[in-house]
Amino acid sequence: VQLQASGGGLVQAGGSLTLSCAASGTISSSIVMGWHRQTPGKDREWVATITARGTTAYADSVKDRFTISRGNARNTVILQMNSLKPDDTALYYCKVTSYGSTYFGQGTQVTVSS
């Protein structure tokens, strides 16, 4: 499975950014897609998940500000991030679980200035 993430960048606090990730390769019909993030010196943190059926879950820190959805293209996932805070600054990783195996993308940087 290969993951290609895009989006991210620099934004002021209160602004918005959109991340997208496309998975390719041998993909299960019950694929689970999501996002994690990591800042230097800290463990990778779960952000949000969406199942193949569209069930979503969010970390408390991003609930009501971030929205995860499946993209129009097959096996894509979108993370819409609104009301961004400096604490959201991190390297964001797309994550996919397919046929019992977990894969992470290469990471895309999100920087929120105060």
Image (cartoon, rainbow, N blue to C red):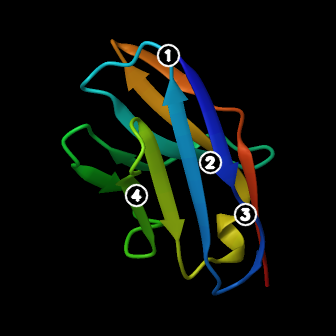
Q: Amino acid at mark 1?
A: Gly
Q: Which mark is residue 15?
A: none
Residue 18 occupies which quadrant of the picture? bottom right
Give the alpha-carbon distance from disc 1 to disc 4, as whole Å: 22 Å
Q: Please tell me which of labels 1 and 4 falls first in the chain.
A: 1
Q: What residue appears at the point 41 percent right and 35 percent down from the top-left corner? A: 75
Disc 1 versus disc 2: nearer the observer: 1
Q: What residue appears at the point 70 percent right and 84 percent down from the top-left corner? A: 13
Circle 1 is placed at which residue position?
A: 25
Label 1: few (<14), some (14–19) or many (≥20) C-alpha neighbours in 10 Å: few
Give the alpha-carbon distance from disc 1 to disc 3, as whole Å: 30 Å
Q: What residue appears at the point 64 percent right and 42 percent down from the top-left corner? A: 5
Q: Amino acid at mark 3?
A: Thr
Disc 1 versus disc 4: nearer the observer: 1
Q: Is residue 96 left or right of residue 91?
A: left
Residue 7 lies, with reference to residue 16, above or below; the image says above
Q: Could you tell me residue 11's position as x and y percent?
A: 76, 77
Secondary structure beneath dot 1 equals loop
Circle 2 is placed at which residue position?
A: 37
Secondary structure beneath dot 2 equals strand
Circle 3 is placed at which residue position?
A: 89
Q: Is residue 82 left or right of residue 9?
A: left
Farthest residue toward the front? 73
Circle 4 is placed at which residue position?
A: 68
